[in-house]
Structures are given as structure tokens and as C-alpha cells.
Image (spheres, rainbow, N blue to C red):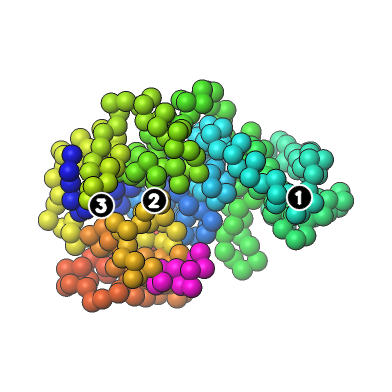
Amino acid sequence: MPARRSDLLRLRRLAQAIDGPREPDVTSVARRMLALQGQDFAAGCWALALRTTGAQQSDVLAALDAGRIIRSWPMRGTLHFVPPEDLRWMLSVTTDRIVAGLARRQQQLELTAADFARAADIVTAALTGGGSIGRAEVMQLWEDAGIATTGQRGYHLIYYLAQTGLLCWGPVVRSGNGNPTQALVLLDEWAPAPPALEPDEAVAQFLLRYLHGHGPATVKDFVWWTKGTVAGAKTARAVLGDALTTLEVDGVEYLLTAELADRAASTPPTRGEKDAVHLLPGFDEYLLGYQDRSPILDEGHWELIVPGNNGIFQPIIVAGGRVVGTWRRDGGHVTPLPFAPLSTAREAQLQRSVRAYTAYAAG
């Protein structure tokens, strides 16, 4: 059915629990979203918390310590926070294509199958029985065993062993500067083995869960998000059948779950939605969860979000579903940097969001 861009963005904010009902805790957020960008650890923690009814930083760290959320590379070679029960079937869809694409880099780093096997044996022996190990410590283990980790070899070993289902990032540790990081654990000890899915079922589950937490989105958005194939997306769409519906905006077809369409229809927009203002972290799924970001971000503002096009996304201010500025935190002080002056109503909402972030960071 034809719709306006504002309808598209409202549906996305509802799907992502940015506007509308929030999730009760960060574990529920991870299940709803399936995967949230996690290459910036602190940003990913805030992305989880802002979609709840009031989780603080300590709540996020506690969920990670308990293994209710884990972090790994389920797709695109990018770290994400994911539910532990979902990681294996996600990897069953993505790993073969990703590993095939690593061959050239492995040759450049002079890493062989024997290196990966030895590294796996060493880290398995160190972690079996509930152990955990920091990045520097696992590098030292490998070095002591004669496996060089310099020149990105160590990082690539960790990445490969996580991508192939041996390791994931688990409990929180404090680094030397006091900032939280994570230790490596064995995936088998931190994630239950889910029922095996047939390939078509797994891709269909991927599409359904992506749309559950990100829809409406295009087929191209989904293919980009998973680094999958158009053929696989078409098969998934056919398998899901009536569980999905469509929305047309500016001549573009978007997919969404029938459940989201029904929920949006039964909860009309409130008067305050157009003035709702949110502080989202850098790399947030609301901006990075789609190949096409033009519905959310003006092209002229791209340089302000990714200065120098260096791949580092700034935290963003979102109002009425659109990116209207950036923000930064200096110690305990939040500095909003809107692209243009906000209305009185939106300025009030902005200050409310500043207080919410401050409360999160202090907890």
C-alpha cells in the first residue's frame, strides 16, 4: 500500500523500540533486534539500554556477565551484540561465504590451516571448564606456543575462530583505563545448541527476525545487512508467506511483518511523536541497519556524521525519525550539536533525552 516517508520512519521507530513501547530489559532488546552493532563497545551498550524502560549501564554489563547477551561476528565481519541462542544458526547462514572471502587475507598474513588448528587447540585447552581470557592473554598463549600474532595475525585468529563457532566475547573485564571490555569464552559453554535449521528455514528466520526489529526494509537492505544473496532473500520471502506484508514509499517496496503493520494500525500516532527527540549512539542500528539511509539522513549532513568518511559514525540526535544533529560526551557532560535550532518542544525533549543518558551512564 502507498505510504508517506513519515509512516515508514514511524514504523521503524516502533520496530526498533525507539518510540512506542520499550522493552523491559536489555536481553529482550537483543532478542527483538537479533543483532546490534557492537564494534564500539560503549556505543553498543547504550544502544541496548536506550530501547528499554530505563536500564542503566550496570544492567547491560550484568547481562553480558551472565551470558544473556554475547558479542561476536555473525555477519559482515562486524561485531554485533546477539542473543546466545541465535548465534549458531546465524553463522550457519553466513560463515561459508565469509570464510571463503578470507582466503586472500590469510595468504597475506601467512596463516595456514595448521596455524588455525593449533590456535584452536591451545585456546580450547585454556578455556574448557568455564574459563575466560582477555585479548592480550590469548595472544601471549599463542606466542608462547610459537604462533606469531603480530601484523594483525592475532586479531585474524580470534576473528576466524569466532566466525567458525569456537569463541565469542563473554564476561566484562576492566581495562587499564577503567573502561569495560570483554573476555573470550568458548561458545559451546556460553550458548545453548539450538535445533538445527534447514538452509531455507535459517534464511527465512534471518529475514523474519531482521524485519521484526528493523522493518520496514527493502530486500536490498536485508541482503546488505547479512551480506547474503538476493536469491536467498527471495526464497526466505516465499517461505514466510503471509507473515510479511509490504509498504510502498516513493515508488520503493518495503517489507515488514504483518504483526508490525497490525500493531501500528492499532496504536495511532500520539501528538508528541513528531517532537520526540532521542540521543542515539554512533553506529546505531536505526541509521546503520539499512543500505539506503536517505529516508533518515540528508546527504548534505553525511560529512558531519562520518567526518572525513573515515568509517567512524558520530552519535546522532534523531527528531521525528530524522537525523537532526550529533552529540558528544565530555566526562559527565553531554553536549548536543544540532544542525539547526530546534523548536521549543523539541528542545525540551532533547533535554529529557540528555537526562536519560546521564542517568544510564551514572548507573
The correct choice, above or below, for 196 with respect to 128 in the image is above
> Can residue 224 be seen in the rendering of this structure?
yes
Compared with 294, 157 (above or below) is above
Q: Which mark is residue 107?
A: 1
Q: Quadrant of the C terminus?
A: bottom left
Spot occupied by residue 199 in the image (x, y as percentages of width and height): 51, 26
Magenta stretch in the rendered image: 303-312
**Residue shown at 25%/52% (left/top)?**
9
Front residue of 81 and 64: 81
Asked if residue 14 shows in the view, the reply is: no
Q: Which sits earlier in the primary sequence, circle 3 or circle 2? A: 3
Instruction: Give the structural element (helix, strand or loop) at label 3.
Output: helix
Q: Which three-letter amino acid code belongs to the residue tagged 1?
A: Gln
Q: Quadrant of the N terminus?
A: top left
Point out residue 216 in the picture as x, y percentages from the top left corner: 30, 43
Judge from the rendering whether residue 138 lies leftward or rightward of residue 257; answer left or right. right
> Which element is circle 1 on?
helix
What label does residue 9 carry, if any? 3
> Residue 198's spot in the image, x, y percent?
51, 22
Q: Residue shown at 17%/72% (left/top)?
A: 343
Q: Residue at x 48, y 42 (%)?
A: 226
The three-letter code of the residue at mark 3 reads Leu
**Residue 177: image location, x then y, percent:** 61, 68
Q: Which residue is mark 2?
A: 290
